[in-house]
């Protein structure tokens, strides 16, 4: 028989090995726990193994890293940016421009760190990790959330560009607007920080209902911010003879940047709602 013929000659051991009938020469049967572990990894069932039996590192090697932990990390970094809005305003009101510059530098650093997390998340999204929501929806959600930090940075830069003094008659309502914008953002961040349990529940069930209620609060708080902004604008233009055109121009820039923060928070909430509804 030729060499090529012998290479294709039927060997009965092949069938025995394939059927799990091991003779003296075949490979030893695999450990039942190993088989059980392989089954769990193939079908991702929680009922096969106990908690902690499969390490997250092994799962991530097989299926890719989950984006939800870094999404929460991004939300927390955005929150750090948001928390600087009130101190920036207070420094501007008391005309402490050295502190304004210091806070602007801090916001710039935090916004950069948020961008780094954003880029890392986008590197994770194309991978083969099984997600309960569409990757495009997650990317749009991330973009909206990142816009909150961008709005804070814009506000800080406006305060640095010109030493604009807030007229004493406008200080109370201006601070009221700042506080309301911050409240909109913080209400949204409280939703974003629940992404991990929300993902674990496949964006459904009681966890999803709780988040949907909170998202409705984001919209309500943003509506309140709009109303305060209109009152502030009306009061500002009633004083235009006193304020002068350049002051008014910079007030408008400040209001626009603050409004962008609230709008970005509302848009992020809308994207989260859409993912829950689709899920």
Image (cartoon, rainbow, N blue to C red):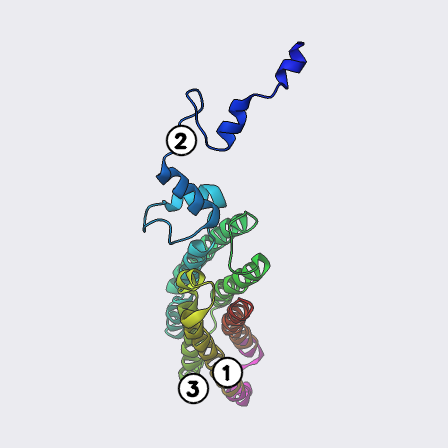
User: Where is mark 2, residue-wise?
Assistant: 29
CB of mark 3 within 8 Å of CB of mark 1?
Answer: no
For the stretch drawn in magenta, the main secondary structure is helix
> Callout 3: few (<14), some (14-19), or many (20+) C-alpha neighbours within 10 Å?
few
Left/right placement of residue 7 relative to residue 175 reads: right
Above/below status of 34 relative to 245? above
Separation of residues labelled 3 and 1 (CA atoms) = 24 Å
According to the image, label 3 marks what residue? Answer: 169
Residues rendered magenta in the picture? 234-248
Does the residue at mark 2 contact the one at mark 3 (Cβ under 8 Å)?
Answer: no
Quarter of the image that includes the N terminus = top right
- Determine if the magenta segment contains residue 244: yes
Mark drawn on residue 223: 1
Quarter location, residue 209 = bottom left
Q: Position of residue 252 (x, y in %)?
A: 55, 77
Asked if residue 259 lies in the magenta stretch, the reply is: no
At horizontal 38% and vertical 67% (from top left) the residue drawn is: 83
Which dot marks residue 109?
none
Give the foreground label among 2 and 3: 2
Circle 3: element type: loop
Q: Position of residue 243 (x, y in %)?
A: 52, 82
Q: From the viewer's perspective, is residue 26 above or below residue 158?
A: above
Give the residue displayed 43% in from the left and 76% down from the top. 214
Where does residue 47 sit, x and y in percent of width and height? 37, 54
């Amino acid at each position: 028989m030729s060499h090529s013929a012998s290479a294709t000659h039927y060997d009965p051991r092949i069938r025995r090995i394939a059927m799990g009938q091991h003779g003296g020469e075949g490979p030893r049967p695999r450990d039942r726990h190993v088989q059980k572990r392989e089954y769990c990894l193939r079908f991702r069932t929680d009922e096969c193994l106990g908690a902690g039996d499969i390490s997250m590192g092994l799962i991530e090697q097989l299926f890719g890293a989950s984006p939800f932990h870094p999404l929460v990390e991004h939300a927390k970094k955005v929150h750090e940016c948001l928390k600087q809005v009130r101190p920036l305003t207070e420094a501007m009101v008391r005309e402490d421009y050295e502190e304004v510059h210091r806070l602007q530098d801090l916001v710039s650093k935090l916004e950069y760190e948020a961008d780094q997390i954003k880029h890392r998340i986008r590197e994770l999204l194309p991978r083969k990790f099984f997600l309960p929501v569409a990757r495009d929806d997650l990317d749009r959600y991330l973009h909206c959330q990142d816009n909150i930090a961008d709005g804070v940075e814009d506000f800080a830069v406006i305060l640095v560009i010109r030493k604009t003094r807030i007229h004493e008659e406008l200080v109370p309502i201006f601070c009221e607007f700042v506080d309301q914008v911050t409240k909109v953002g913080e209400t949204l961040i409280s939703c974003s920080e629940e992404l991990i349990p929300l993902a674990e529940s496949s964006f459904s069930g009681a966890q999803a209902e709780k988040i949907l209620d909170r998202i409705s609060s984001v919209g309500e708080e943003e509506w309140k911010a709009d109303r305060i902004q209109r009152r502030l604008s009306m009061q500002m233009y009633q004083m235009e003879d006193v304020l002068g055109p350049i002051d008014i121009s910079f007030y408008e820039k400040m209001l626009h940047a603050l409004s962008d923060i609230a709008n970005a928070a509302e848009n992020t909430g809308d994207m989260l709602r859409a993912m829950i509804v689709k899920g």
